Amino acid sequence: MKIRLLTFCVIFMGMTALTFAQEEEGEVQNDSISLVEQAEREAKEIRKQIEAAEREAKEAEKAAKAAKKEQKRADKAAKRIEKLNDKISAIRKTLDRDEKKVSKISNKMEVDKIKGKLSPNDIAKIEKKLSKLKSNIAKNQEKLLKIERKL
């Protein structure tokens, strides 16, 4: 009877140990499955963060390109305005110079006429020269008006 009791106790303890081992093994499997699921969730979150960072980087790059393009436009416009201002100053200089020439030649012609130093041919040449200068002045004034309108 002792052997039967001993055998029964050993088998009973063995069965109990096996059931506990199986329960622990199931928990380990459940724990490993939950860890894998948690790792997958974390990986998805990290992917989302990376995608968001990439989108932000693309948007920042687009904004930088747009700012650079706008800067180029502004520089180009500034250069254009500067060139127009240079042309205006050059035309005004030419106008002033031509007007001074006209007045100087007219005055000299009047003085020489009074003194009687000019022949009719000389007077015709001087008047032709004066008319050329006056037409140049008129053309330059038109150019000046056109350029000032562009500004």
Image: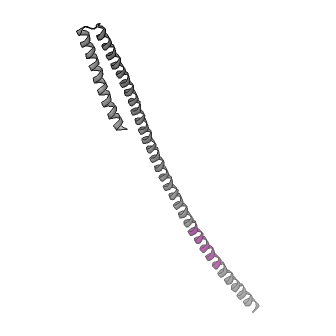
Give residue 116's position: percent from left, percent from top. Answer: 28, 7
> Residue drawn at (27%, 8%), measured in percent from left and top?
118
Q: How many labels does the image show?
A: 0
Instruction: Quadrant for residue 75, please give it.
Output: top left
Instruction: Quadrant for residue 10, please give it.
Output: bottom right
Give residue 64's position: percent from left, percent from top. Answer: 48, 47
Residue 129, placed above or below residue 14: above
> Residue drawn at (28%, 16%), measured in percent from left and top?
129
Q: Foreground residue, 84 or 111? A: 111
**Chosen colour scheme:** one colour
Give residue 17's position: percent from left, percent from top. Answer: 69, 81
Q: What predominant SS class does the magenta segment belong to?
A: helix
Q: Foreground residue, 113 or 44? A: 113
Instruction: Give the side of residue 4 with respect to residue 149, left or right.
Output: right
Q: Which corner quadrant holds the N terminus? A: bottom right
User: Does the magenta run of residues contain 15?
Assistant: no
Residue 14, placed above or below residue 144: below
Seen as rendered, the residue at the extreme front is 114
Instruction: Give the side of residue 29 with respect to residue 126, left or right.
Output: right
Residue 137, placed above or below residue 72: above
Give residue 131's position: percent from left, percent from top. Answer: 26, 20
> Residue drawn at (55%, 66%), measured in percent from left and top?
40
User: Does the magenta run of residues contain 25?
Assistant: yes
Q: Foreground residue, 48 or 125? A: 125
Q: What segment carries the magenta color?
A: 22-39
Instruction: Give the side of residue 81 with respect to residue 114, left or right.
Output: right
Q: Which corner quadrant holds the C terminus? A: top left
Residue 62, placed above or below residue 138: below
Instruction: Give the side of residue 78 with respect to residue 138, left or right.
Output: right
> Residue drawn at (46%, 42%), measured in percent from left and top?
71
